[in-house]
């Protein structure tokens, strides 16, 4: 094809995450993901230095952390005029297609105009609600519903504030299920108030419908793919003479590898001539070849050898496949998996769309941690699963009966359990930046203090140059992404005319690998 495709990569060309893509046709546009760019965000902000929410989008805009198109955003968040503002090549954004529910793909969706519906799988919608209902409110990630804002002044400074909860309800976003049907339970979940018990701020609910019944004038086909989170989908969109495929994040190493195979097969049959693909693992430091099956076998052997010691399994909370894996291993070894209340809420919400998920039971317990005051959703979880909670003292009295799903931020709970040694299995992704390396140092200090044997990574420090080095131990984590070899196989099977890499730190790799056969836009 001689003309440029109707695609603008707004963010995520040279970073892993932060993906924001615009597909446009005849004055109308679709956004493909609208994630938080952790790499760029981390250049300016950290846990105790945050953007000023009272100024709406001003800090994000000034530092180039959002695309410079004011028409994309909620007007209440655009205080005054922004310098260097640009116009989009469309008059209307018809929808936001979310590939899956990871923050680097949806974490800035909350700033978008509320008339832009979310288009995703039903599982992604359930996960968006779980994330928002159980998290501290930050308007940038409010993908399911938005807080009501009012403009006011403080010493002549124009600011925004959240409206009175008694008078100003949340504003729900419309949703379109692009893969499969939605259940009545999911519709009720999407449209109800934030608090599961029905209390608190009201909700002006958004509508929910299937893509076939929606008013969208786009040909969008969704294909479930294998990834480290439920509901991940690749999409194929017809746009004039272009048939555009977007992989989102996908892999071939999990339980749904056949779904990824089917997407590639359909992309070939449907004549895809533009392929937008992720490239997470083409960079040398991001390569992981372990499969979920191998992860299970290796972790099983470790837990089997734990004897009377406590076992900690550290994995991503949204990785339900890994949660099921450790629940199965725990049961096989006469142990019970202990999860956090937030994990239990996620499972409860996902139950509205998937029937075969483990739920809190005699074999899957919810950790009861000391806290000054529970949130409404925590009250609801502890009340709903009151027969399936476990305290630190109970774990301490019989550590050989449990596998505890703790990550770095949960290490403080070890001060309550007071274990006498144990085994810690790291089953998550490697550190990507200096800040994460520092977290690994703190994690190592916790584990060393309580005499845990560490499986999954090795921490090394060169005292002479004060250098931190974390070496990952293969076999206990399965990546959510394709290897470089698998990317090559996908590209050559689909045979697009145009290849657009995103979600990668090495876009030039695609040039070197494919420019002889395909037009590569980086």
Image: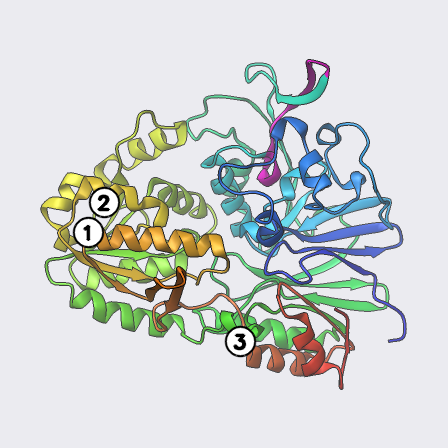
Which numbered dot is residue 314?
A: none
For the rendered model, the colour scheme is: rainbow
Q: Secondary structure at mark 2?
A: helix
Q: Which residue position is annotated with label 3?
A: 483
Disc 1 vs disc 2: Cβ atoms closer than 8 Å? yes
Does 129 sit left or right of 303 as displayed?
A: right
Residue 143: x percent and y percent? Answer: 60, 41
Q: Which residue position is annotated with label 2?
A: 414
Q: Please, is residue 90 above or below residue 381 in the view? A: below
Mark 3 or 2, nearer chain start:
2
Q: Nearer the viewer, mark 3 or mark 1?
A: 1
How far apart, in angstroms, are the residues tagged by discs 3 and 2? 36 Å
Q: Please, is residue 485 above or below residue 308 in the view? A: below
Badge 2 density bin: few <14, some 14–19, many ≥20, Cα 10 Å? some
Q: Residue at x 40, y 61 (%)?
A: 468
Q: Residue at x 29, y 46 (%)?
A: 411
């Amino acid at each position: 094809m001689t003309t440029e495709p109707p695609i603008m990569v707004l963010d995520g060309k040279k970073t892993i995450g932060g993906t924001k893509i615009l597909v446009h046709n005849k004055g109308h546009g679709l956004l493909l993901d609208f994630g938080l760019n952790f790499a760029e965000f981390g250049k300016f902000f950290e846990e105790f230095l945050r953007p000023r929410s009272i100024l709406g989008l001003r800090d994000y805009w000034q530092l180039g952390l959002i695309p410079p198109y004011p028409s994309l955003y909620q007007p209440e968040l655009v205080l005054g005029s922004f310098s260097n503002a640009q116009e989009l090549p469309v008059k209307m954004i018809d929808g936001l297609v979310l590939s899956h529910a990871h923050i680097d793909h949806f974490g800035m969706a909350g700033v978008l105009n509320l008339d832009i519906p979310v288009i995703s799988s039903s599982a992604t919608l359930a996960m968006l609600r779980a994330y928002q209902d159980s998290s501290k409110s930050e308007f940038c990630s409010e993908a399911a519903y938005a807080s009501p804002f009012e403009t006011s002044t403080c010493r002549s400074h124009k600011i925004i504030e959240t409206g009175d909860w008694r008078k100003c309800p949340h504003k729900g976003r419309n949703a379109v299920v692009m893969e499969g049907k939605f259940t009545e339970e999911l519709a009720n979940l999407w449209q109800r108030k934030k608090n599961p018990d029905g209390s608190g701020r009201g909700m002006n609910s958004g509508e929910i419908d299937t893509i076939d019944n929606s008013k969208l004038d786009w040909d969008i086909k969704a294909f479930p793919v294998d990834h480290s989170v439920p509901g991940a989908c690749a999409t194929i969109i017809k746009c004039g003479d272009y048939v555009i495929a977007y992989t989102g994040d996908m892999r071939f190493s999990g339980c749904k590898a056949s779904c990824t195979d089917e997407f590639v097969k359909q992309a070939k049959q449907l004549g895809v001539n533009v392929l937008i693909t992720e490239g997470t693992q083409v960079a040398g430091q991001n390569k992981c070849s372990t499969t979920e099956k191998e992860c299970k076998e290796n972790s099983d052997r470790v837990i089997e050898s734990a004897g009377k010691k406590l076992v900690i399994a550290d994995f991503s909370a949204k990785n339900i496949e890994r949660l099921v894996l450790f629940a199965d291993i725990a049961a096989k070894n006469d142990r019970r998996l202990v999860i956090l209340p937030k994990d239990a809420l996620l499972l409860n919400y996902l139950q509205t769309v998937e029937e075969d998920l483990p739920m809190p039971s005699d074999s899957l317990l919810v950790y009861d941690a000391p806290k000054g005051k529970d949130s409404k959703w925590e009250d609801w979880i502890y009340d709903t699963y009151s027969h399936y909670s476990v305290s630190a003292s109970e774990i301490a009295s019989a550590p050989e009966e449990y596998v505890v799903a703790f990550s770095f931020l949960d290490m403080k709970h070890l001060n309550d359990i007071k274990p006498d040694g144990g085994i810690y299995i790291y089953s998550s992704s490697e550190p990507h930046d200096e800040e994460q390396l520092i977290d690994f140092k703190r994690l190592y200090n916790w584990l060393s203090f309580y005499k845990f044997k560490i499986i999954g990574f090795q921490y090394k420090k060169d005292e002479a140059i004060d250098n931190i080095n974390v070496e990952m131990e293969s076999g206990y984590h399965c990546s959510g992404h394709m290897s470089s070899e698998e990317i090559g196989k996908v590209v050559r099977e689909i045979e697009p005319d145009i290849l657009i890499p995103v979600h990668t730190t090495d876009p030039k790799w695609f040039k070197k690998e494919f420019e002889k056969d395909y037009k590569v836009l980086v």
